[in-house]
Image (tube, rainbow, N blue to C red):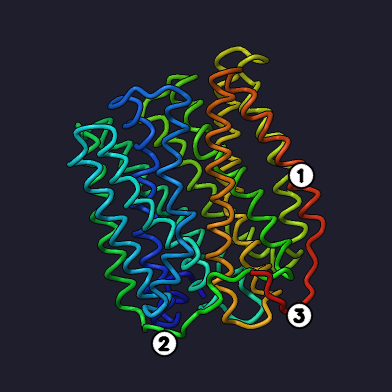
């Protein structure tokens, strides 16, 4: 059975959500491929100023559990619509209503709030649409679609800036339009009956390993979101076209890699996948931080590009944490609140990691930021080895 036939026979909600994932992924890809160059060209930030921007950008990740708790009555799918509308508004305003740095920060906060609200919702809906025992496979398929969207979005950026005379306003407008389309598609899905989630703001000690994994993920993630592109843009002085090309290549690789990763989670388990991610990250950190000092300039640039692509591939290992949470959850009603709480938990530490990283960059050099990242990867490795699938007896700790 070919892909087109399988797509036609798939359940209606799965087809709609897959389509929304493609459109939404294109929007976020356009933003990711242009935002660092936009900051560099419009505001000329140094390393610490760039890292400080992560506070307003990542603060919504800390607040997301409170916003989700307040909007529980919408249900996951309608809350997803609201999240995408917020991101669309933020993207448009960044492009057209940012006369100064602090005004741009306000619009970035709105864009980021929508983005972070949608993170746990995407995993929740994806697992709702999976067959029993195939959560990893389904999330891998959806991530593969989002990687195809990365290719499309990055190619549009490359084509626009190289041949069509694009400005940043063009790309932010495109991103906003795609986000509006994704919101409409999500609205067309069958809404789930809203059930009051009193445990959004409640942590359970039996899930403490899951929370710990997200603490480490948050710190690691922020180092790479903030500083990895900044190394390419500022240290290696690469233009928007190169960043778009790297995102395109990452998307091409991800289309094939994400389904394999999803099947690996189902086959080998979360423990193996999470530990393997940590080992790869150690090498990626050293490549980012020290290639410039070890190799000639051309080779160093290629090494950093390879690290960038490897990092893009393993970013989706986050779905292993989501499937782990589903397996250890005492009841289904704990899953989305726990995923949402994890976003808040990891952002407490990711904001701190960005600020500390910026100070280290300014005081000692960018290479020491990634040395810190390697240390976090080692801790992550030993934490991942503790993963076991044992259904817990729930006892609230907060």
Helix, strand or loop at disc 3? loop
Residue 22 placement: quadrant: bottom left
Q: How many marks?
A: 3
Q: Looking at the image, is mark 3 or mark 1 earlier in the sequence?
A: 1
- In the foreground, 380 or 300: 380
Q: Is residue 157 left or right of residue 325?
A: left
Residue under label 1, please give it: 379
Q: Position of residue 355 (x, y in %)?
A: 53, 34
Q: Position of residue 219 (x, y in %)?
A: 61, 44
Helix, strand or loop at disc 1? helix
Q: Position of residue 316 (x, y in %)?
A: 57, 54
Q: Position of residue 161 (x, y in %)?
A: 27, 32
The furthest residue to the front: 398
| CA distance separating discs 1 and 2 | 40 Å
Residue 221 placement: quadrant: top right
Residue under label 2, please give it: 193
Mark number, residue 393: 3
Quadrant where the image shows the C terminus: bottom right
Please identify, in this view, whether the residue under mark 2 or under mark 3 is nearer the observer: 3
Reply above or below: 94 against 128.
above
> Dot 2, crowdedness within 10 Å: few (<14), some or many (≥20)?
few
């Amino acid at each position: 059975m070919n892909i087109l036939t399988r797509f036609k026979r798939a359940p209606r909600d799965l087809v709609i959500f897959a389509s929304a994932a493609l459109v939404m992924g294109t929007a976020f890809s356009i933003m990711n491929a242009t935002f660092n160059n936009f900051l560099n060209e419009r505001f000329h930030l140094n390393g610490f100023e760039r890292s400080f921007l992560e506070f307003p950008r990542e603060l919504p990740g800390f607040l997301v559990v409170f916003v989700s708790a307040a909007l529980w009555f919408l249900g996951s799918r309608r809350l997803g619509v609201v999240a995408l509308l917020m991101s669309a508004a933020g993207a448009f305003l960044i492009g057209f209503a940012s006369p100064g740095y602090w005004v741009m920060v306000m619009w970035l906060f709105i864009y980021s709030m929508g983005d972070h609200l949608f993170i746990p919702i995407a995993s929740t809906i994806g697992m709702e649409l999976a067959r029993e025992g195939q959560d990893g496979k389904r999330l891998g398929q959806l991530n593969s679609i989002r990687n195809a969207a990365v290719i499309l979005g990055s190619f549009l950026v490359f084509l626009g800036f190289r041949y069509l005379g694009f400005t940043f306003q063009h790309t932010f407008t495109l991103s906003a339009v795609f986000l509006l389309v994704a919101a409409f598609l999500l609205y067309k899905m069958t809404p789930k009956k809203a059930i009051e989630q009193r445990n959004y703001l409640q942590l359970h000690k039996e899930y403490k390993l899951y929370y710990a994994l997200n603490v480490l993920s948050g710190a690691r993630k922020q180092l790479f979101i903030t500083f990895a592109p900044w190394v390419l843009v500022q240290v290696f002085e690469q233009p928007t076209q190169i960043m778009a090309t790297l995102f395109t290549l990452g998307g091409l690789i991800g289309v094939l890699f994400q389904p394999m990763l999803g099947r690996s989670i189902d086959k080998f388990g979360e423990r193996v996948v999470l530990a393997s991610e940590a080992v790869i990250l150690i090498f990626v950190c050293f490549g980012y931080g020290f290639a410039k000092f070890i190799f000639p300039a051309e080779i160093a640039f290629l090494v950093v590009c390879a690290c960038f692509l490897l990092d893009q591939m393993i970013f989706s290992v986050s779905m292993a944490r989501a499937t782990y949470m589903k397996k250890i959850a005492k009841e289904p009603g704990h899953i989305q609140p726990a995923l949402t709480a994890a976003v808040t938990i990891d952002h407490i530490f990711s904001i701190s990691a960005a600020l500390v990283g910026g100070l280290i960059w300014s005081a000692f050099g960018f290479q020491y930021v990634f040395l810190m990242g390697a240390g976090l990867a080692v801790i992550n490795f030993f934490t991942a080895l503790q993963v076991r699938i044992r259904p817990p007896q729930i006892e609230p700790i907060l």
